[in-house]
Image (cartoon, rainbow, N blue to C red):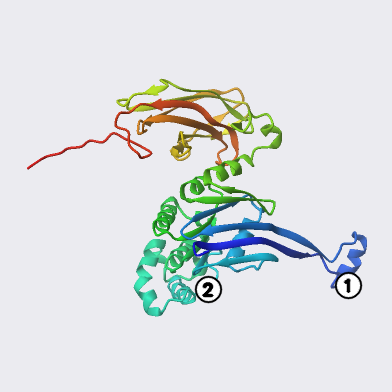
């Protein structure tokens, strides 16, 4: 038990939803012509959820809107108490949820830093020492003497997040509210996540961004309709989450578990030539041909390469590459070539390709392990990748 940071056992959470009361003469009269309702209704926000999180683990919680994941996060934070079951934590916990709660809109940014710093347990001297770092991280130097009510929501979250990162904690609960902000600020947030991983902090991470789940999480759970339906490796959970956005009638037409999507755009051919790459090969080219079956705007083309053990070697997509793919009408065809540097170690590799909606979640056509290639190298190493390296040795 000494290695367990959070233990969740048989947790359920119910909310009582009261219906309209006739507390005035007007409502009593108008209510005579409405169907009778009971006094209240029970909403089952979570049902019998159990899992454990080890110390130093980056743990993901994913699920669709309304599935119950935010309720679970608030219960871990102690904001809600379970109706049934128990939650125990070991160590100091800091929630990065509802960022900015406790901020006073009538105070300046500077005054709010000192106010919230005190709520986090810092002395004035400690806040003095960290103040400039907080402001620099939030990138709000010019606005710190303005009242908070004049800040945009994004500016408030940046200030709140910057302040929260100063809290000394063993366990951090992070909601996807961190998506607020421009690309540079998000990069700072994710750099901070990397620091947490290196420091072996325990992090519970709620997100709709499956790329982030795959990159940072060691394990994850999938919440659907108030129940935990799956637990396991982040790649497995992220794939299951993505499949949930495929209409059932379309999913039934897919080719087993290896292919799915709504079929609005399909991949007609995926090929890799040659099939075998020698050590001196500089590039691996993957050719994909596709056809639109319906009008599609800015489809996202993606690729993922795994080795024989299932480890993800690399992955990218046209959205990451900032490529505007345009509009396709039914019957339009096209092709895309992915040219990859031959960083691969000796062995066999499996390629997954996908075309998704511009939201990056709804899949038009996902093809798992659709093609393979082999790499032969004499200088193989025990590591995942083996790019060209140059060694110069001189003796004096």
Q: Secondary structure at mark 2?
A: loop
Give above or below for 106 relative to 300: below
Is residue 240 at all visible to an observer of this figure? yes
Q: Which residue is mark 2?
A: 104
Which badge, 1 or 2, is on the more N-terminal residue?
A: 1
The quarter of the rendered structure image containing the C terminus is top left
How far across and down, in percent of the image, does residue 333 sit? 55, 22
The image shows residue 290 at horizontal and vertical percentages of: 54, 25
> Is the residue marked by circle 1 packed among few (<14), some (14-19), or many (20+) residues within 10 Å?
few
Asked if residue 284 lies left or right of residue 207, the reply is: left
The one of 1 and 38 positioned closer to us in this rendering = 1
Are the residues tagged 1 and 2 within 8 Å (C-beta)?
no
Of the numbered discs in the image, which one, if any, rests on residue 145? none
Instruction: Give the residue drawn at x 59%, y 36%.
Output: 363
Furthest residue in direction front, as rendered: 1
Mark 2 crowdedness (10 Å alpha carbons): few <14, some 14-19, many ≥20: some
Q: Residue at x 55, y 69 (%)?
A: 101
Residue that protrudes farthest toward the left in the picture: 396
* Residue drawn 77% across the image and 62% down it: 42
Provide the secondary structure element on which disc 1 rests. helix
Q: Which residue is mark 1?
A: 25
Q: Is residue 322 visible?
A: no
């Amino acid at each position: 038990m000494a290695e367990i940071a959070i233990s969740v056992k048989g947790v359920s959470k119910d909310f009582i939803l009261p219906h309209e009361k006739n507390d005035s003469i007007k409502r009593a009269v108008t209510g005579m012509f409405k169907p009778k309702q009971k006094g209240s209704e029970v909403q089952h926000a979570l049902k019998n959820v159990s899992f454990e999180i080890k110390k130093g683990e980056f743990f993901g919680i994913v699920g669709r809107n309304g599935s119950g994941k935010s309720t679970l996060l608030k219960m871990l934070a102690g904001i809600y108490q379970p109706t049934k079951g128990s939650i125990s934590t070991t160590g100091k916990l800091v929630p990065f949820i509802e960022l900015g709660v406790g901020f006073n809109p009538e105070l300046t940014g500077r005054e709010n830093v000192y106010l919230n710093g005190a709520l986090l347990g810092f002395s004035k001297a400690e806040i003095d020492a960290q103040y400039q770092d907080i402001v620099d991280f939030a990138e709000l130097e010019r606005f710190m003497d303005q009242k908070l009510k004049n800040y945009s929501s994004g500016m408030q979250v940046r200030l709140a997040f910057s302040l929260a990162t100063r809290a000394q904690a063993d366990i951090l609960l992070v909601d996807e509210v961190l998506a607020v902000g421009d690309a540079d600020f998000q990069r700072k947030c994710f750099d901070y996540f990397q620091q947490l991983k290196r420091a072996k902090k325990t992090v519970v991470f709620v997100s709709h961004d499956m790329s982030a789940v795959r990159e940072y999480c060691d394990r994850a759970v999938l919440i659907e309709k108030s129940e935990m339906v799956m637990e396991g490796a982040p790649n497995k959970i992220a794939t299951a989450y993505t499949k949930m956005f495929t209409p059932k009638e379309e999913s039934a037409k897919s080719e087993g578990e290896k292919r799915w999507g709504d079929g609005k755009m399909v991949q007609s051919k995926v090929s890799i030539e040659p099939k075998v790459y020698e050590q001196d090969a500089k590039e691996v080219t993957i050719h994909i041909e596709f056809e639109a079956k319906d009008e599609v705007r800015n489809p996202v083309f993606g690729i993922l390469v795994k080795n024989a053990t299932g480890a993800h070697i690399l992955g990218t997509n046209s959205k990451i590459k900032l490529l505007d793919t345009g509009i396709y009408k039914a019957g339009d065809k096209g092709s895309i070539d992915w040219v990859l540097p031959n960083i691969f170690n000796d062995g066999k590799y499996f390629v997954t390709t996908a075309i998704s909606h511009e939201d990056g979640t709804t899949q038009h056509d996902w093809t798992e392990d659709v093609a393979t290639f082999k790499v032969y190298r004499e200088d193989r190493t025990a590591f995942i990748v083996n790019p060209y390296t140059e060694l110069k040795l001189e003796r004096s």
